[in-house]
Amino acid sequence: MTRAWQCCFHPPRSTYLAIRILNGLLSPVYEDAEKMYEIRGHVLHTICAHGAKVRDLTVETALVGVVDDTDMTKDGAGISQVQEALAPEISHGPLEDYVDI
């Protein structure tokens, strides 16, 4: 399987696999099924949007993307991270009104 194909296939597969796990984790915590499905939907959106060309719909999802893109264990810290990773994550997304670069 080529790397490009893995990148396109990974988020949907991860989202599908997470449904059963999230049901098991969230059901004991949230007695209200509607609330449980709402929380599950937010988590699934974050998984799907992570590493894919999916628009971040919530601040929380955008923050996960920013944290991953600026992970200093993957890249050295510096201005290039701001230009290449942080700026695209923030511009035109839910964090745009909160962060000034």
Image (cartoon, rainbow, N blue to C red):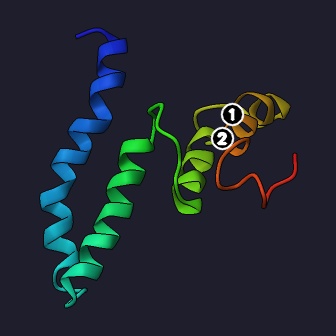
- Give the answer, above or below, for where 37 lies relative to 67: below
Measure the alpha-carbon separation of dots 1 and 2: 7 Å
In the rendered image, the quadrant that contains the C terminus is top right
Q: Residue at x 44, y 33 (%)?
A: 52
Question: Helix or strand or loop: what does disc 2 sit on?
Answer: helix
Q: Residue furthest top?
A: 2
Q: In this figure, which residue is indicated by the disc labeled 1? A: 85
Q: Residue at x 65, y 47 (%)?
A: 93
Q: Residue at x 56, y 44 (%)?
A: 68
Tell me where residue 41 sits by quadrant. Answer: bottom left
Q: In this figure, which residue is indicated by the disc labeled 2? A: 89
How crowded pointer 2 is (Cα within 10 Å; few <14, some 14-19, many 20+) is rated as many
Residue type at mark 1: give it: Ala
Q: Residue furthest bottom?
A: 31
**Which of the pair 83/90 is nearer the observer?**
90
Q: Residue at x 38, y 62 (%)?
A: 42
Residue type at mark 2: give it: Glu
The numbered disc on residue 69 is: none
Task: State the image coordinates of residue 53 (x, y, percent, origin top left).
Answer: 48, 31
The answer to whether the residue labelled 1 contacts the one labelled 2, judged by CB atoms less than 8 Å apart, is yes
